[in-house]
Image (tube, helix red, strand yellow):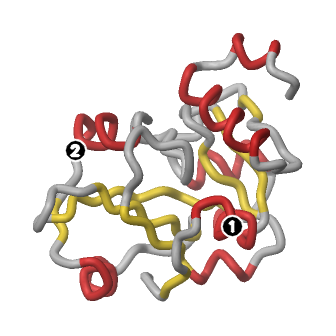
Amino acid sequence: MCGAELTSLPEGVQRVARLLRDKGHPHAPQMLDDAARTAQQAADALGIEVGQIAKSIVFRRKSDDSAVLVVTSGDKRVDEKKVEALVGKLGRADADFVKSRTGFSIGGVSPFAHATDPVMLIDRELFRFEDVWAAAGHPHAVVRLRPQDLEGLTGAPVADVV
């Protein structure tokens, strides 16, 4: 993307696209015809395994009200106790909290280009795949990347969180 085509994209997707372009990532966000609010919907739309979806799960850390973002494989369930052992006690993050901290609505939370930097963990299960797909700032937007790219773009540690 050179820049001009960004203006037709939703604002959150524009932020993600700019970050990816600035970091030299080879893939730009893609807009899907239908919303991909769940890992299964995204996998079906892309014709891939549900495990290849890098889903973003947001929690609220109780000690300081920080957003904790766990990027996990779409076929796995986050083990909250494992996450708490790494970052502290967690609480529920409602839609308003997610939007205010990340700048994205639930169903379109990207692993990068947040309004404020979250505490972040990457599920090691994503590394089973050569390519994964993550939300790109909107429920209709996704981006292709390798798990290693996700680690490099975010600087987040890889952990056992499922």
Relative horizontal placement of residue 90, taking residue 129 as reference (left or right): left
Looking at the picture, tell me which residue is in the foreground, 89 or 38: 89
Q: Secondary structure at mark 2?
A: loop
Q: Quadrant of the C terminus?
A: bottom left
Q: Amino acid at mark 1?
A: Gly
Q: Are marks 2 and 1 in contact (CB under 8 Å)?
A: no
Label 2 CA crowd tier, 10 Å (few <14, some 14–19, many 20+) = few
Residue 129 to residue 28: above or below = below
- Return the x and y of residue 103 as percentages of the image width and height: 41, 34
Q: Residue 16 sits in which quadrant?
A: top right
Q: Which residue is mark 1?
A: 152
Looking at the picture, tell me which residue is in the foreground, 143 or 116: 116
Q: Earlier in the sequence, mark 2 or mark 1?
A: 2
Q: Amino acid at mark 2?
A: Asp
Q: CA distance from mark 2 to mark 1?
A: 28 Å
Q: Secondary structure at mark 1?
A: helix
Relative horizontal placement of residue 30, taking residue 98 as reference (left or right): right
Residue 20 to residue 51: above or below = above
Number of numbered discs on residues: 2
Q: Residue at x 76, y 41 (%)?
A: 22
Residue 66 to residue 6: above or below = below
Q: Residue at x 38, y 56 (%)?
A: 118
Residue 83 to residue 153: above or below = below
Q: Residue at x 64, y 26 (%)?
A: 14
Q: Which residue is mark 2?
A: 94
Q: Quadrant of the N terminus?
A: top right
